[in-house]
Amino acid sequence: MNTGHGLRPLPAATPATGFGKLRVGQWFLLAGVFILMVFTVAGAFTVISIEETREARVAVVDVVDPAALRALEISNALTSQESSVRAYGRTNEETSLQDYRGAVVAEAGALASIDGLMSRMPERRTVAAEVARLKAAGEAWRRDYAEPLIASVPTMRTEASNRQNAPVNAARFTEIRQSLTALQDHLNRLHMEGGVRLEKGWQALYLALGGVAGVLVLAGIGSVLIVRHAVLRPMAELNGQVRAVAQGDFEHKLKVERPSELAELSSHVDAMRRRILTEWRRASEAQSKLEEQTAELRRSNGELEQFAYVASHDLQEPLRKVASFTQMLDQRYGDQLDDRAKQYIAFAVDGAKRMQLLINDLLDFSRVGRVGGERTAIDTGLSLQAALNNLAVTIEDAGATISSDDLPTVQGNRAQLTQLFQNLLGNAIKFRSQEPPRIHIGVRRDGDMWEFSCADNGIGIESKYTDRIFLIFQRLHGRDVYAGTGIGLALCKKIVEYHGGRIWVDGEEPDRPGTTFRWTLPSGDTDE
């Protein structure tokens, strides 16, 4: 089956044999399955080690150690309570009583914190029982010693109150110390056991990570071997063959045995080599013919330019004679001619002049981009001034007012830009309204381009004609209304497009009469 360009499809690749049947993906799949199995075992062991280590750390750092700290706070609070009560019994000072009350609150807060940790506490029931005994011992001490002493101080002498309650204080506080010691010893033991578990967990984790690292190393080594055997060596072989072709040995055959993808690729590349070689030979022949045709086209264009130059002079000379002798005929025999004959003479003179103008306009149109088309940095203000000088009489007769912004420097041809301004200004004056023409040449920067505008207060252009006005010989008005050849705006379009820009006309705006032409030209800044 042929394609749309007449080229046949490439032939099918030669099938691989032996290990060459395996694709690169299959090589990696076999190795990947084995590595995945080992990696899964090592990963599972790692996850278990991490979880056990985390649990041991949480038990030690987040539960046992905070509980031990709270037990120490309880010890400090009970000691503060005992010293504050005895001081109150000796001095009957309110400050000592306030210290006692504060220590009671501190003890309650520490006990509450331990209760909050109890749900995650190792050996929770034993620890809870010890905390309960400590709490009960504290309450018994306050009930049997502290509160009675505080109540008796205002009515008894302080020393008598202390001596009376001292035996109770010693007995009850001894129970507190015993309960507190049991709790702290238990928490210390849990801390040590948790530390041992944490150390074992870290060791297991390091071992698991070492296993994972080993698997990764093996995977890397396996991948390197597979890539070397299945990819790098065949690629190097194919690269050498392609280099030989690139260095000019176009007859060198490309063939690689493995893997399947490279074997198929080498077969297709070799088929493309053969086709490219064939097409290159055809293209060389076509290039030779094209160069011959280009040379013939240059010669033909030169002859056409010479013909246009000669034709312009040879055509205009008879036209000048026709117009001149017809006018002489009117001057010499005008009194002998009737009105119809004079009208015929006027028609002949007008036709000759219009033909002469049309020839000049066509020559100007054909010269754009061919004759004198060199582009340099041009001050468009000077081009506008030259156009104004050429139109000085027309501007004065029409009473036109022309203004402009500060015009920039662009890359262009001075004569053609002057002609561009002259044609646009001439049109604005020609197609004026009842009011004196007011024309403004504006400009603004648009990226790498300058956007110019020519706005007037004339009769305007209907939107439905904006696409037609730039076509050659397109006229919107009859010759009896507005003179002209219909080439002016087409010439403007050709000049602007030759300079790399575009030209257009704004749509109608009810609140603003007249027409606005806009066009773009490349910047002439030296730093861009």
Image (cartoon, grey):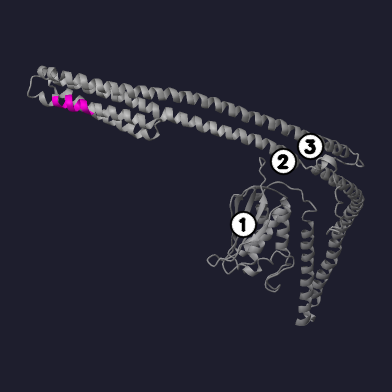
Spot the residue most to the left.
155
Q: Mark 2 or mark 3, which has the lower sequence index?
A: 2
Give the residue type at disc 3: Ala
In the displayed structure, would residue 101 be above or below residue 91?
Answer: below
Name the residue that disc number 3 marks.
Answer: 230
Query: What is the distance, in whole Å, between disc 2 and disc 3 at their CAs?
Result: 13 Å
Residue on which disc 2 sits = 29
Which residue sits at x=65%, y=34%? 38
User: Where the N terminus falls, by quadrant?
Assistant: bottom right
Q: Which residue is mark 1?
A: 453
In the displayed structure, would residue 416 be above or below residue 185?
below
Q: Is residue 528 above or below residue 295?
A: above
Position of the C terminus by quadrant: top right
Q: Is residue 257 left or right of residue 208?
A: right
Which segment did they paint magenta? Answer: 139-148
Contact, mark 2 vs mark 3 (Cβ under 8 Å): no
Helix, strand or loop under label 1:
strand
Residue at 62% over, 31% down: 212
